[in-house]
Image (cartoon, rainbow, N blue to C red):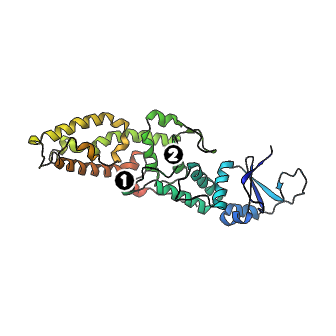
Amino acid sequence: MVAERSSLWFDDGNIVLQAGDTQFRVYRGMLTRHSTVFADMFSIPQPSHTHTSDDSDVVDGCPVVHLSDAAGDMEYVLSALFLNSFSSTRSQPLAVIAALLRLGRKYNFEKLQQDARAFLEKDIPKTFQTFRRRASNSRIISYPGVEFDIANIVHENQMNTLLPVALYDCLIYPMETIISGVTGEKVTKSATALSRLNHENQLRVALAKERMSTVRFKYSYGWASTEYASVFPARNCESLNSLICPTRSRSIINTIAQQAPLQPFLGLQGFDKLFFKSYLCDACLEVAEKYYEEGAEEMWDELPGYFNLDPWDKLQDDDVW
């Protein structure tokens, strides 16, 4: 099979890398400067070549190095290295992040790997405060099942401090989808059509889905139960004989409880003040919000445990350099 030239082809380049049937003509010096693996590879004396027309290990006078990596991944990495194509301030396809992490680790492109990890760390919060300030639109370009792929990449690269929220984001899907995965469009040439959690992550998300469905009612709406009778309704409740607010709240919360198994992830979201304002007086609304927010913080503190992970203060990213 005749290899094709990629768009990364420098006429004055002095080394050709081939991944699959795609070749990249680049600069040996840049590779050795940024990768200890390539530096070691090129330090080994190479056999001399006789320049015959069928010599497939030489192209335009440049030695060819055959690599086992996907051509798409190699193009992302070399583009970031030689063209500065990767920017942490712009939205990026997840395939780019995955390639920089995967090949960054394999070839020890330390800077590229650090940049990719920093990109994910900026997108996936590790504290309750940053979680609540999280932008609604991720900088990772979305596609069906992207949450599954992000969780797998975080897990694969042992970014343990990001794993609780990466798995939490998968809870938006119903159980059957968590098991079967999501078939979506091929958004990039190296992305797979089926996005599915690996087996370990599937088990963790399934377990957390059940656990959070149970505790969500307790932490989010416990203030409406009889256990909180000493604080709710509020002492200065404005409803008739202080009965209307608790009656209304228990009625609507019973309805919410029936939906809780389908939406366990909502327990960490902010208190829906506008919604409850229709049912509670201002004094009771203030009490409900206070205990709801306290419950949300408790759920956050327990979040890693729902996925059978270590507590927040014990989670550490493995040293991959």
**Vertical order, 125 against 253 (above or below):** below
Q: Earlier in the sequence, mark 2 or mark 1?
A: 1
Regarding mark 2 in the picture, which secondary structure is present there?
loop
Task: Let me know if residue 320 appears in the view.
Answer: no
Q: Amino acid at mark 1?
A: Arg
Res. 132 mark? 1
- On the question of residue 273 being in view, the answer is yes
Q: Identify the residue position indicated by label 2 in the image.
A: 142
Q: What is the distance, in whole Å, between disc 2 and disc 1 at their CAs? A: 20 Å
For the residue carrying disc 1, how many other residues have a C-alpha within 10 Å: few (<14), some (14-19), or many (20+)?
A: few
Q: Position of residue 213 (x, y in %)?
A: 35, 39
Image: 250 above or below 126: above
Q: Position of residue 176 (x, y in %)?
A: 46, 32
- Estimate the x, y position of residue 254 in percent, counting from the top left: 25, 35
Q: Which of the two discs, 2 and 1, sits closer to the camera?
A: 2
Circle 1 sits in a helix, a strand or a loop, which is it?
A: helix
Please name the amino acid that badge 2 sits on. Ser
Q: Which mark is residue 297?
A: none
Task: Say left or right for 257 vs 145.
Answer: left
Quadrant of the rendered structure where residue 113 is? bottom right
* Percent coordinates x, y for residue 92 in the rendering: 55, 52
Q: Residue at x 38, y 55 (%)?
A: 133
Give left or right: position of 138 versus 132.
right
Q: Horizontal placement of 133 versus 251: left or right?
A: right
Q: Quadrant of the C terminus?
A: bottom right
At 55% from the left and 37% from the top, the residue drawn is 184
* Left or right of 177 on screen, residue 236: left
